[in-house]
Image: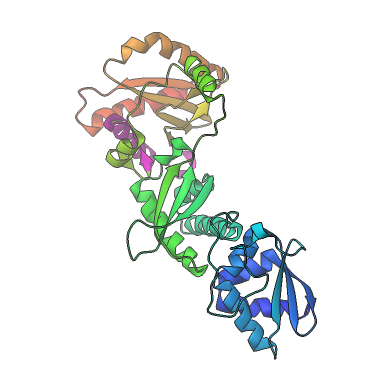
C-alpha cells in the first residue's frame, strides 16, 4: 500500500482538492493486509474533518476503483484508537462508515485544523495572485492579515463569508475599493479548494487581555503614546467618505494634499521621483507612537507633512516637542500646513512645491 498511496492521493486530488490536502498533509498508511487499510491521522481535528465531510466518501470511492474488493478503512489518531473526545458522538465509529451516512458533528470537538490550513492557503494564493496582477497594495494588506475565519453568511441561499482578522489600525485601509479587488480572486481561489465564499470583510483582531486588564488599561491611559495623537474621526466613517487609491483619510484636507503630492509626483522623471506614505504608523526614538499625515521621500531625504486644523495653534508646545523628536530620528524637514480658505488645486500645489524644494535643499 505504501507504493499505492501516491496513486491513491493523485486519484483523490482529481476528484476533490480539499480531500487531497487533508489526506496528503494529515494522514499516513500504517497497515494494509488486503482487507483492512489502517490510516494514522496526525490530529483529532483532521480525524473529525475526514469522518464528518464528503472527503470520507471520496476516499471510499477511490479505494473501490483501485482495489477489488475495496478494503475497510480503520482510522487511528496519532497512532492510537480514537478516544471519546475525538469522536463526533459517544458511540461514534472508529472506521469510515458506508457512503451516504454522515455522523452528527460534535460541538465539543477541537477546531477544524484542516479547514484552517485551507483558509491560510487560500489567503496566501490570493495575495500572490493580486501581486502578479499588479495590485501590490492589496497584496501587502493581505500579508498583514493575522487570521482568517470562515463564517456562515447572514444571507439565505448564499455561500459563506470570509472575515480577514487584521490589527485595528489597518481596518480602515481595507476600503470598499480594496475589498472589491480582493473578493473575486479570493472567491475563485476558495472555489478551487471546494470552499464556497460569497463575501469578504476585514474586522479588527481582538486584543489580548488578562485578569489585570483594568490595571493595564489605566497604565496605558496615564502613559499615552504621544501628544500628537489627537482624536481622529472613526476609521469606518473616514474610509467611507475620504478615500483614494485604497488609502483612507481622516479629512478632506488630507485628501487634497494627497492629490497635490500625486500631481507633483507625475511631473517628476522616473529616475528621480518621490514616494508618498499617507498616514503611516511609526515609533520614534523616545518610545512614542506617531501617525503623521504624510511621509515623503525624495533624493535620499525624508520629510513629513502635517495638515493642521484651523485652531491647531493650541497644540504648539506639543508639536514643537514632537518635531524635535522627529528631527532627532532622521526626518530632514517637517512642514505644517493649514488649508483653511484654499479653494483651488493650484494653491495647494504651491505649498507642495515649496515643501519639496525645502526638502531637496535641506542639509
Among all residues in the image, which is located at the extreme top? 317
Residue 363 appears in the picture as rendered: no
Q: Magenta residues: mostly which secondary structure?
A: helix
Residue 272 part of the magenta-drawn span: yes
- Along the line of sight, the residue nearer the viewer: 46 or 133: 46
Q: Is residue 232 above or below residue 72?
A: above
Q: Is residue 184 above or below residue 338?
A: below
Q: Is residue 146 left or right of residue 335?
A: right
Tell me where the magenta segment starts and ends, as one range: 247-273
Q: Position of residue 100 (x, y in %)?
A: 53, 79
- Along the line of sight, the residue nearer the viewer: 128 or 33: 33
Q: Position of residue 309 (x, y in %)?
A: 29, 20
Q: Position of residue 254 (x, y in %)?
A: 32, 31
At x 50%, y 49%, the residue is: 142
Q: For residue 75, what is the image quadrant?
A: bottom right
Quadrant containing the N terminus in the rendered view? bottom right
Q: Is residue 31 above or below residue 168?
A: below
Q: Is residue 2 above or below residue 327?
A: below
Residue 113 appears in the picture as rendered: yes
At x 46%, y 21%, the residue is: 333
- Along the line of sight, the residue nearer the viewer: 41 or 281: 41
Amino acid at each position: 500500500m505504501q507504493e499505492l498511496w501516491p496513486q491513491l492521493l493523485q486519484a483523490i486530488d482529481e476528484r476533490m482538492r480539499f480531500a487531497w490536502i487533508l489526506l496528503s498533509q494529515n494522514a499516513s498508511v500504517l497497515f494494509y493486509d488486503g482487507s483492512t487499510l489502517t490510516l494514522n491521522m496526525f490530529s483529532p481535528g483532521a480525524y473529525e474533518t475526514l469522518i464528518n465531510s464528503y472527503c470520507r466518501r471520496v476516499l471510499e470511492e477511490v479505494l473501490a476503483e483501485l482495489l477489488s474488493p475495496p478494503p475497510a478503512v480503520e482510522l487511528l489518531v496519532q497512532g492510537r484508537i480514537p478516544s471519546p473526545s475525538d469522536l463526533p458522538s459517544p458511540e461514534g465509529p472508529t472506521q469510515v462508515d458506508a457512503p451516504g451516512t454522515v455522523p452528527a458533528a460534535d460541538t465539543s470537538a477541537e477546531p477544524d485544523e484542516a479547514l484552517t490550513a485551507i483558509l491560510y492557503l487560500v489567503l496566501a494564493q490570493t495575495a500572490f495572485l493580486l501581486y502578479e496582477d499588479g495590485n501590490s497594495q492589496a497584496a501587502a494588506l493581505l500579508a498583514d492579515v493575522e487570521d482568517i475565519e470562515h463564517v456562515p453568511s447572514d444571507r439565505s441561499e448564499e455561500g459563506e463569508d470570509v472575515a480577514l482578522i487584521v490589527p485595528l489600525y489597518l481596518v480602515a485601509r481595507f476600503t470598499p475599493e480594496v475589498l472589491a479587488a480582493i473578493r473575486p480572486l479570493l472567491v475563485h481561489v476558495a472555489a478551487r479548494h471546494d470552499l464556497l465564499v460569497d463575501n469578504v470583510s476585514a474586522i479588527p483582531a481582538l486584543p489580548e487581555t488578562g485578569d489585570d486588564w483594568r490595571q493595564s488599561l489605566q497604565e496605558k491611559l496615564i502613559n499615552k503614546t504621544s501628544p500628537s495623537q489627537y482624536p481622529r474621526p472613526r476609521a469606518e466613517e473616514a474610509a467611507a467618505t475620504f478615500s483614494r487609491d485604497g488609502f483612507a483619510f481622516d479629512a478632506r484636507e488630507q485628501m487634497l494634499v494627497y492629490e497635490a503630492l500625486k500631481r507633483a509626483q507625475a511631473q517628476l522623471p522616473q529616475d528621480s521621483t518621490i514616494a508618498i506614505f499617507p498616514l503611516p504608523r511609526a515609533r520614534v526614538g523616545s518610545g512614542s507612537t506617531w501617525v503623521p499625515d504624510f511621509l515623503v521621500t525624495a533624493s535620499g531625504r525624508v520629510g513629513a507633512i502635517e495638515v493642521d486644523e484651523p485652531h491647531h495653534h493650541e497644540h504648539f508646545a506639543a508639536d514643537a516637542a514632537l518635531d524635535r523628536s522627529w528631527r532627532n530620528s532622521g526626518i530632514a524637514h517637517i512642514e505644517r500646513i493649514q488649508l483653511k480658505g484654499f479653494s483651488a488645486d493650484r494653491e495647494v500645489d504651491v505649498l507642495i512645491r515649496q515643501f519639496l524644494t525645502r526638502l531637496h535643499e535641506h542639509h
